[in-house]
Amino acid sequence: MALVSRNEGKKVNSNINVTPMVDVMLVLLIIFMVITPMLNNKVNVELPKADAAVVMEDANKEDAVTVAVTRDGRTFLGGDQVTLDDLGTKIAAKLENKTSKEVFMRADARANYGKVMDAIDGIRAAGVSQLGLLTERVDDSGANNSHK
């Protein structure tokens, strides 16, 4: 009788193939890089439309100070809801180390005008030298962009 020996155990490959994992990670990286700039406007408001809007590139910067007033009258500083009494002090704290004292306001087209004016008064109380009111530009082509 002859003994048959099998050598299959010697051929086992113990290397891990990382190529599929790298492919998935690169796809996720690209997705996050595309979506991240869209997260700037944390509060959804329907901006009023204007024909003579001027482009304000500084409003899209990551460190831009943005105040939003929603349709129901709530006031937001960045993505955080604030009261009108605290708005001035919180804006002053954010602008403390900045050279340009510029704040951008995103007010809903159907927001109460008095609430918007109260928010503007709070912004002015913080010593803001420039206040940009963001609107949607009405183009003939039908494309809408954020502008002043």
Image (cartoon, grey):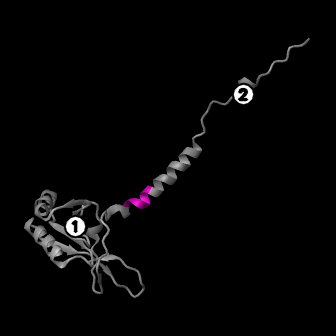
Identify the mark nearer the N-term, 2 or 1. Answer: 2
Q: Which residues are magenta?
A: 32-36
Q: Which residue is mark 1?
A: 74
Using the image as rendered, state which of residue 27 and residue 89 is in the foreground: 89
Kindly report the distance in space between the C-alpha atoms of the residues bearing marks 2 and 1: 68 Å
Q: Which mark is residue 11?
A: 2
- Classed neighbour count for the residue bearing mark 2: other residues with Cα under 10 Å, few (<14), some (14–19), many (≥20): few
Using the image as rendered, state which of residue 56 and residue 43 is in the foreground: 43
Q: Amino acid at mark 2?
A: Lys
- Classed neighbour count for the residue bearing mark 1: other residues with Cα under 10 Å, few (<14), some (14–19), many (≥20): some
Q: Residue furthest front?
A: 72
Specify the quadrant of the image occupied by residue 9: top right
Name the residue rendered at 37%, 79% in the picture.
144
Q: Residue furthest top?
A: 1
For the question of whether residue 128 can be seen, the reply is: no
Name the chief secondary structure element in magenta.
helix
Q: As displayed, is residue 81 above or below residue 72?
A: above
x, y percent for residue 66: 23, 66
Name the residue rendered at 26%, 69% in the picture.
59
x, y percent for residue 74: 22, 67
For the question of whether residue 136 can be seen, the reply is: yes
Q: Amino acid at mark 1?
A: Arg
Q: Nearer the viewer, mark 2 or mark 1?
A: 1
Specify the quadrant of the image occupied by residue 132: bottom left
Q: In screen coordinates, is 10 left or right of 60?
A: right
Quadrant for the N terminus, please: top right
x, y percent for residue 89: 10, 59
Q: Which mark is residue 112?
A: none
